[in-house]
Image: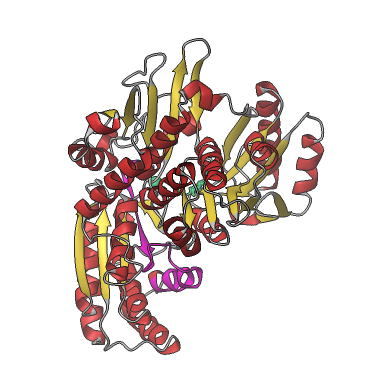
Amino acid sequence: MDKETIIAASKKHDIVPGRVYKYGTAGFRMKADLLEGVTFRVGLLAALRSRKLNGQAIGVMITASHNPAVDNGVKIVDPQGDMLEQEWETYATNLVNAPTHEDLVDYFHKLADALKIDLASPGKVIAGRDTRPSGSTLIAALAHSLAATSTTYVDYKILTTPQLHYLTRCINTAGTPGAYGEVSESGYYDKLLQAFSRALRGRKISGGLTVDCANGVGGPKLNELLKRHDSVKTGLKVKVVNDDVLRPEILNLDCGADFVKTRQRAPPNPKPAPGDRWCSLDGDADRLIYYWIDPETGFFMLDGDRIATLAASFIADLARSAGLNGQLRIGVIQTAYANGASTKYIEQHLQLPVVCTPTGVKHLHHAACSFDIGVYFEANGHGTVLFSATAIQTFRTKEPQSPAQKDALDILSALADLINQTVGDAISDMLMVEVILAHKGWTMKDWALTYQDLPNRLVRVEVGNKDLFQTTDAERKLSHPVGCQDEIDKEVKKYTNARSFARASGTENACRVYAEAATRSEADELANKVAVIVRQHGGY
Ligand SMILES: CC(=O)N[C@H]1[C@@H](OP(=O)(O)O)O[C@H](CO)[C@@H](O)[C@@H]1O
Ligand SMILES: [Mg+2]
């Protein structure tokens, strides 16, 4: 690989000097005009990663998810559709921060030597982007670095993040016994719709569903799926709203899953009518939040914790009905942000184990892999259900002893195809929720009544130096600044059923404080007190 070619290309896509870039929870994410050089360099890393993994395709996704329209981001997808291996995050950070073009190429070659990568071997990268206008400049920078490194490159253009994860896995498993699906966007829709119909097993969905697409890529993609969907057969009648992608400035503006979750209210426009079933996707369609307006009590949100409990209870029941009791380990993975009432419900009512991991789906995903069926969701609605190869094999090959067992095994098998196995996927998760509600014959109210959330508050606290805040115990406690946790504990003790923790955000320049308690006013008060403590320890 010719040094001069890479240097010449790099000069056309320089990084903005004087900044420190970090591959964080969701890759590199910032104002789009800072990202061109970053994306070029991510292309170099993807070129190396593909060659390190014997030429398997690596995915690059350009998106800033629920962030404002002026932001963008870039992240790397590993061959099986999972997130980039952690050790490589450091290589990505180092590569992007190389001060000069010469340093960049030196580091690129040093990395290749250290990792024993044969640069003459073939490499392959595929890319996708959300609807942000800045995406096209970033894609051009990516294409340029892949050309400079003679890496085969396919641009899948506009996609949801989970679609790119799907395609990456499909390409790398094509022609093998673990083939994940057809390598095309339409293959994605066909797989989901076939599995959706199989999972329903003749049951019909009742009542309409309105889907708020955050004016992001989920809108056109959901419309594509619906074009192919037979609503007479399944009963699912979807109304798509906030699907205007021609006015980029309204992306995620007063709508979408993040708005609904953080504001704890429905989008103001259009306004849901009492009794309606609604859900919101985020800007790249990997998060999902359900809600409805209870005619008596008003807005009621069913977030990631609710989706996790719904899925876990349904799947555990199916496993029992299929005669698989005790044969498959089922577990639920949450983060510290999960409502305490949901954790209690899973452990005590559903009698399933709960694992708590640090924030960021890569941690949850990893923990879910240690179960035969691992249900993982962040409270914000990002998550999925992972089925092990053993579980899928069991559903397909176990001889049913009764029609009820056959029913359960077939539904489990269909769910394993319906639920995106690579990453949280709002469209796939939404179809899963609809299937479960149809089977249980539940309304939104029935779902809402399963347990009562503890009132909670999430506060963003700007501090002088967020890096002072270091955590332990899956982020539930601060080890640094010394003394800060003791002060938080002292406050928590003053309230009933209370819990609170603070940590530095991995995606924003701030700390987050979470508090829950027996009443709304206590949760608010506790959150504010802990926020004061964090501010005092935060440096200036
Ligand atoms: C409290 C919260 O919702 N945190 C989010 C947010 O991470 P922070 O590290 O808290 O900024 O963005 C992540 C990426 O989307 C997501 O995984 C995570 O759940
Ligand atoms: Mg997202």
Q: Quadrant of the N terminus?
A: bottom left
Q: Quadrant of residue 73?
A: bottom left
Q: 532 and 497: which one is in front?
A: 497
Residue 456 at least partly seen? yes
Residue 423 located within the stretch drawn in magenta: no
Q: What residue sits 21% from the left and 80% below the top?
A: 150
**Residue beneath the point at 44% across and 60% down:** 397
Measured as percent of width and height from the top left, residue 185 is found at 21, 53
Judge whether residue 93 is colored magenta.
yes
Would residue 146 appear left or right of 38 to someone viewing this image?
Answer: left
Q: Residue furthest top?
A: 296
The residue lying at 82 percent from left, 39 percent from top is: 490
Note whether 83 is above or below 453 in the view shown: below
Tell whether 95 sits left or right of 230: right
Residue visible at 40% across and 40% down in the picture: 432
In the image, 501 versus 122, the foreground residue is 122
Q: Which residues are magenta?
A: 67-95
Whether residue 464 is visible here, answered yes or no, is: no
